[in-house]
Image: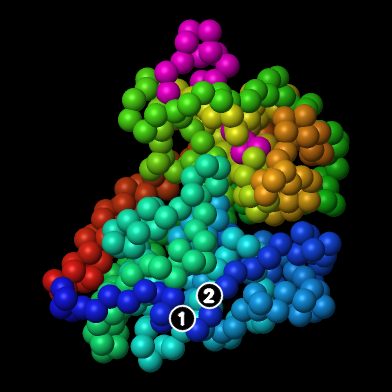
Amino acid sequence: MSKLATRKKLGELCSVVTKGTTPTSLGMKFEDEGVPFLRIQNLSGSSVHLKDILYISEDTHNALNRSKIMPGDFLITIAGTIGRVAIVPDDFPEANCNQAVAILRFDKSKLLPRYLLHWLTTNDALRQISGKKVTATISNLSLGQIKELEIPLPPLDEQKRIAAILDKADAIRRKRQQAIQLADDFLRSVFLDMFGDPVTNPKGFPMGTIRDFVETANYGSSGKASETEGEYPMLRMGNITYEGGWDFTNLKYIDLSEKDKPKYLTQKGDLLFNRTNSKELVGKTAVFEEEKPMAIAGYLIRVRTNELGNNYYLSGYLNSAHGKKTLVGMCKSIVGMANINAQELQNIKVLLPPIELQNEFEMIVKITKQKVKSFNRSSELLNDNFNSLSQKAFAGEL
């Protein structure tokens, strides 16, 4: 590709640039079955999936006509976690989406979807996006800002060549990522095998609340963090992944007084709960496993258990399909944000299995995650290689 390839605004290439709506804001409700309703977590691996899907009725789907999704549509997340992209498969059922997902429809004889998909991961695209997002609370990208993104547009044959090269490189790294995903699936399966379905309770455990397991539940600091200066890294809502893991790629830093350190610092084994976020992401939960302490921001709750509870068990429950559904159903919205406070978290009903069984689950989690670490190291190397190849492709150096 020539370095002088014509650049076009994305809006000039699209016949449709729209986004979804939250049905509950219109007085509508989710159903047990019906039309799939996509959220951020339903976009992964450059495609869409029906795992943990919500449903709306046909009537609601028709009322939300603007955000009906068609096969071949290009989707990009624009709130909460921005920049996830997906191409809707040809055999995907009729669907709709919420306000965190934008829908792009364009002439594929001018712009190849997979070329656009790969370009959106480049430094060029990320630089344009990061310069446009709003970061007061939740990062977001407006439809108008998407239309203003400038993409290099070589002839279609060159787009196909670049996409084919990057597809092959991407397939290699995704195989390693799939192995990591299988480990997550394995742990969810182990959780159900050891503790049973929380709804039917086939093992007959006593029923209680998370409060029965809690020694302390503290909010994080409201202090202002710095991009570069501070003794302690500060964990924020974006550092906990939806699946219950950690992403330390975007940390800020803060200094704490001796008085504040016990209140706001983590220690290994703490459970951290994201109490405020978009409705789809509120309630993200993970166990802190680092040796060095980090500070926690005010949007997080730090939980330490008593002698009856184990945070690995609580994390397994809150990250289960039933736990996610419970969290979505109980959170309340405040000015576009959803919230679950410390008291509400502790009031969540949960099975009370013996501590010995909870500890056994912790051991299985730790052994599994130790094996995943080696996958992560090779995955990082593959990602670096892919990113280098991608930058060269869009700079016209392949």
Horizontal side of 172 relative to 252 (left or right) equals left
Residue 396 position in % (x across, y down): 16, 73
Report the amino acid beneath label 1. Cys
Q: Is residue 219 magenta?
A: no
Which label sits on residue 14? 1
Q: Tell me the CA gap for discs 1 and 2.
A: 7 Å
Horizontal side of 174 relative to 358 (left or right) equals left
Horizontal side of 298 relative to 335 (left or right) equals left
Report the amino acid beneath label 2. Val
Q: Is residue 306 visible?
A: no
- Residues packed near mark 1 inside 10 Å, few (<14), some (14 to 19) or many (20 plus): some
Residue 23 position in % (x across, y down): 76, 64
Q: In the displayed image of the protein, which residue is found farthest to the top?
A: 258
Query: Can you say whether 76 is above or below 364 in the image?
Result: below
Q: Quadrant of residue 165?
A: bottom left
Query: Can you say whether 213 is above or below 186 in the image?
Result: above
Residue 331 position in % (x across, y down): 75, 45
Q: Residue at x 59, y 29 (%)?
A: 298
Residue at which label 2 appears? 17
Callout 1 touching callout 2 (CB < 8 Å): yes
Magenta residues? 254-275
Q: Residue at x 67, y 49 (%)?
A: 336
